[in-house]
Image: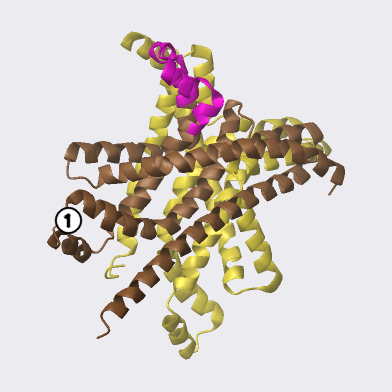
Chain colours: A brown, B yellow
Amino acid sequence: MDFTIVAYAIPFLLTGAKTTLVISVFGVGLGLPFGILLALARTSRNRLVCKAADAYCAVFRGTPMLVQIFVIYYGLGQVGFVRANPVIWWLIGDGLHAAILAVLLNTGAYTAEIFRTALLSLPRGLIEAAQACGMSPWIISRRIKFPLALRQALPSYSSEVAIIIKESSLASTIAVLEITGWAKRLMSETFAIMDIFIITSAFYLTLNVVGLTALKLLERQLWFERRSTRRKATSLCPS
Amino acid sequence: MFETFSSLIVEQGWGLALLRGAFVTICIGFVGMVIGLIAAVPFAIARWQRVPVLSQMVDVYSIVVRGVPGLLVIYLLFFGSVDWVQKVAVAFGYRDMAESAYPSIIGILAIATISCAYSVEVMRGALEAVPQGLLEAAKSLALPPRIAFFRITLPLALRLALGGVNNVWQMTIKDTSLVSIVGMQELMRMAAIAAGITRSPLLFYCIAASLFFAMTTVSQTLFGLAERHINHGFSGG
């Protein structure tokens, strides 16, 4: 490996990493609540809402992310009404914003699937117990269903975070220079294909490890809470 | 609105071009997937049996390819091989052929590389999930290891792997769209060309999206049927 190339490439890739990080952070930060909302819609009693959310998830899970990003950036950018509306134009007129929007819409569909299975796997008894205690549906969701579903969904969600980091690379196809975009440029500039690939993979693996470790810690935090409450519960009723 | 639509699709022939692109997409996806699966079996066995050096190498390959974006793998294979292929082709006097077939070959190879990395994990998981008791039963019947593997372990593992293979296939067919970035004439590339010439990107990208959606839906249904067929007789399997 040629170290002058490494030294040359790293500053560029670092600027790219910043963009990747921005897209991923927005993808997780906005995609998670959006996905949870979608999951709630998919499990709701209202058939229209349920069907609509189902269709949304099927479409976004059934088509490649590249098509979605092109429809949003090139396709919608052509519609006159979108160009006229300043808010929507701000959202998709800029490459970075369009990339964030695409990642957000895409990850929302997958997150919804994860949380839907988590919500469906909740034990009936717990919810019936909450109902028997006279909790309102909102309190049941907030205090019983959601915390349990979150714990259930977190391991699958952490692999979704890794996917978000990878999918953000598609922003390079609409001229947003993130890690992959810079890597491509450096590859055609220096011709040191393998070297650049190795450095870039190291960047991605680092990002993945950081993201996954953060989620592991969060997971352990939630587990610890459960263990401590259980201990408290047993100490309260020693029989 | 409808008239321009029909003139673009039918009279200017873009509909047919997109369908042809879709066919190419299915071909690349399928060939890449099959190559990946076939290559994944020995890799998965190496990891399952913990063959010293090979197992670690497969591990590194699978972690790296699954950890970086597909686009990056495609760039590596395309840019990394241009020089080399050119030299080989010129040396053997197949220059023209190499230039026309090159994107398809590397495209398929890239898809195979990516899908293989995921298939290795699926196959390894399936091999490990085969109940130990069955293997012991085979051993106690004094079946030679090779026969025990081909007649007991592998068929059972393939059944267990089907769900995972379905997931990998869904991902692979969507990943084929990435090959368009480096100039392969598949569905996505056709849509981009049509969008550029006719200046109606929304229409053509939406058509591409619906064709992709049709592909994934149909293959999902087929896999569902296959799963039902293969699990016939396994209660709750």
Quick one: A16 or B169, which is closer to the camera?
A: A16
Quadrant (top left, top right, bottom left, bottom right) of the C terminus of chain A = bottom left
B134 shown above or below A68: below
Name the residue rendered at 15%, 59% in the picture: A131
Residue A90 in magenta? yes
Residue A86 in the image, given as x and y percentages of width and height: 43, 15
Quick one: B188 or A230, which is closer to the camera?
A: A230
Q: Is residue B17 visible?
A: no
Name the residue rendered at 67%, 47% in the picture: A203
Is residue A20 shown left or right of residue A62?
Answer: right
Residue B75 in the image, given as x and y percentages of width and height: 67, 39
Name the residue rendered at 28%, 69% in the picture: B233
- Return the residue found at the far front: A236
Q: Which residues are magenta?
A: A72-100
Chain bearing mark 1: A
Quick one: B57 or A220, which is closer to the camera?
A: A220
Q: Secondary structure at mark 1?
A: loop
The picture quadrant where one finds residue A83 is: top left
Number of marks in the rendered image: 1
A171 shown above or below A92: below
Inspect the image, locate mark 1, and give the three-letter code of the amino acid beneath it.
Met
Residue A98 in the image, given as x and y percentages of width and height: 50, 27
- To which residue does mark 1 refer? A135
Magenta-colored segment: predominant secondary structure: helix
B96 shown above or below A41: above
User: Dot 1 surroundings within 10 Å: few (below 14), some, or many (20 or more)?
Assistant: some
Quick one: B226 or B62, which is closer to the camera?
A: B62
